[in-house]
Every structure is written in C-alpha cells, then in structure tokens.
Amino acid sequence: MFAAAAKREEEMKSVSCANCHGGAENWILSHTRPEYPRDALTRLGMRQLGSAYQRANNCVACHQNLSDDLVAAKHPPLVFELDGLLVAEPKHWREEKDFSNTQTWLVGQAVALREAAAQAVREPSARRDAQIAAIKELLKAGGAKFSGTGENLVKEADDYAKRVSTEAAAKGQAQAILIRLVRNREPFGANAFDSVAKDYRMWATGHYSERLVLAIDRLNESVAKSGEGKAIGNVPINDLFDAAKPPKAFDAVVSGAFVRKLDTVAKSLPKAP
C-alpha cells in the first residue's frame, strides 16, 4: 500500500490546474481573490468543482472510461472512486460546511455506473455487463435502487448522483452503509450475478470485491473522522486489500479467501440497526 501511495504522489506531479479547471490563462490571476465572484470566474473559463456531482463528472473521464481498443492494447484497468481521488489530491481548497465523504463516495459510484452504462450502449460486451452488475450491486447493498438497463440506467444513475449531491448526509449514514456492505454475502453466492453471461459471472464478483474494498476503506475513514460509530482497524482492512485480486484472476478459491477476510472485518463492527 505504501508503494501505491508513493506512485499516486508521483503521478499527481504531472496534473496541472488546467487538467481539472480548464485553461487557466484568463482566470489564474483572479481565482485566489476571496471577493472575486465564482460566476465571474466561470465566465472566464474556470470549471467549478464545488459539488460532488461536478467533481465526479470532471474526474470520471480520465479515471474510468476505457475503450475496447485501449483494453485490447493492454491499458491498465481503471477503477473510479471519487472520495479516494480527492484524498490523494494535495488539498488546495476549503470544503463547504456540509461536505460529506460518504456523499462523495455515493455520488462517485453513481457516476461510475452511469458512465459504464453509457459505454455499454456504445460498445456492448459481456465484460462490461459484469462491471455494471458489480457497481449496481454495490450501490444496492448501500441502499440505492436501480432497476433500469441500457439508456434508462444511464438516466437513473445520473438522476441519483444529482440528487445525492444536493442532500445533506444523515447522521450515522457512513456507519450504516459500511455495516450493510460488510455483511452482504449475495455477490459471493452460487447464484450471484446470474444476469451476466456465465463465463463473466466471476469477473462480476471480482469487480464487486475490488470496489467493495475501496468503499470499506473510504466509509471507514468517514466513520473515524465523524466519531459517530465504531471504525475498523487498519490490519483487517489491509488484509482485505491483499485478498482482492483483479477481476480476470478472480475464481472460487480467491472468492473464498476474500469472504473469510470479509468475515473478520464483519466481526469488528456492531450489528446492523
């Protein structure tokens, strides 16, 4: 994990203001003045990133979307997780008073689902269906509902992301979602992801496990910072990271080992309300 953190820090050195905020030549001299109106900066070309929805839309293009041609060319896989990206970015802004890491995580996953569903409309494949099913299951386990497919799912996920981005996080929300995710075993059952082509069902379990570990890590940090519940220790979470494997390497043996580590994490949390 330390090596991964060092790699992220090195990668961030190549990210400029323009990557996230657009061309800076017209606003760079004004944006640090606290009295300068945001709408004026927007008119000068500065992309505003105050809300979780704005941030997710800005980041997802580079941190998730891969065409089939890029995948075939052996581009490394991408997993979009908005709250983790914001933590990795050297903080050079002040959050609004109602900022929530939990809200950020939820919006990020909804936008990830929207983008995967939109890409499936353009480039349908069983592999992409597995990814979509995994994100839907993760959000469903956290309390969200998505019934649509295809272009309808694109709109459902986008509408959900917009709505969550404007809602204040409820007290204890992070702990409640964390407990539900840690105790959910449906994605590891014999009939898991039966809507996905048979050869890709274990891929879906792998995609789910990959995103689940990141979700547990981020929600656990939110619980620890808020003091509104019992947080999980670093050791079981690190063990869970070690047990997660790339989707194409996920099989019954890996799945069993992962669930055993997940059971250890579950023992450290209170029962769901």
Image (cartoon, grey):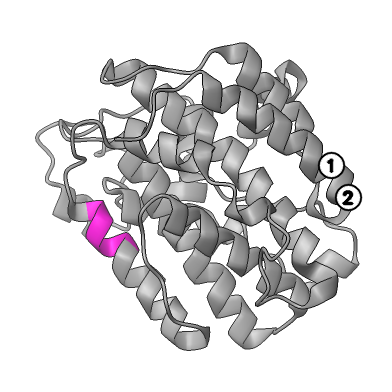
Give the camera-side residue of 95 and 111.
Answer: 111
Q: For the point 63% across and 55% down, which residue is it?
A: 187
The circle drawn on residue 249 is 2
What amino acid is found at the position of numbered circle 2 in the picture? Ala
Along the viewing direction, whichever of 239 and 49 lies nearer the viewer: 239
Q: Nearer the viewer, residue 268 or 120?
A: 268
Residue 271 visible, this angle: yes
Q: Does residue 147 show up magenta in the picture?
A: no
Q: Quadrant of the N terminus?
A: top right
Which quarter of the figure is the C terminus placed in? top left
Residue 242 falls in image quadrant:
top right
Q: Is residue 144 above or below residue 197?
A: above
Q: Secondary structure at mark 2?
A: helix
Q: Secondary structure at mark 1?
A: helix
| Residue assigned mark 1 | 254
Q: Position of residue 116 (x, y in %)?
A: 58, 70
Categorize mark 1 by other alpha carbons within 10 Å: few (<14), some (14-19), many (20+). some
- Magenta stretch, main secondary structure class: helix
Q: CA distance from mark 1 to mark 2?
A: 8 Å
- Measured as percent of width and height from the top left, residue 236 is found at 63, 18
Which amino acid, mark 1? Answer: Val
For the record, the magenta segment spans 161-165
Q: Is residue 86 left or right of residue 8?
A: left
In percent of width and height, residue 99 lies at 24, 35
| Residue at 62% across, 58% down | 64
Q: Is residue 41 left or right of residue 5?
A: left
Residue 229 rendering spot, x and y as whole percentages? 31, 20
**Residue pictured at 73% horizontal, 60% vertical:** 190
Q: Is residue 22 visible?
A: no
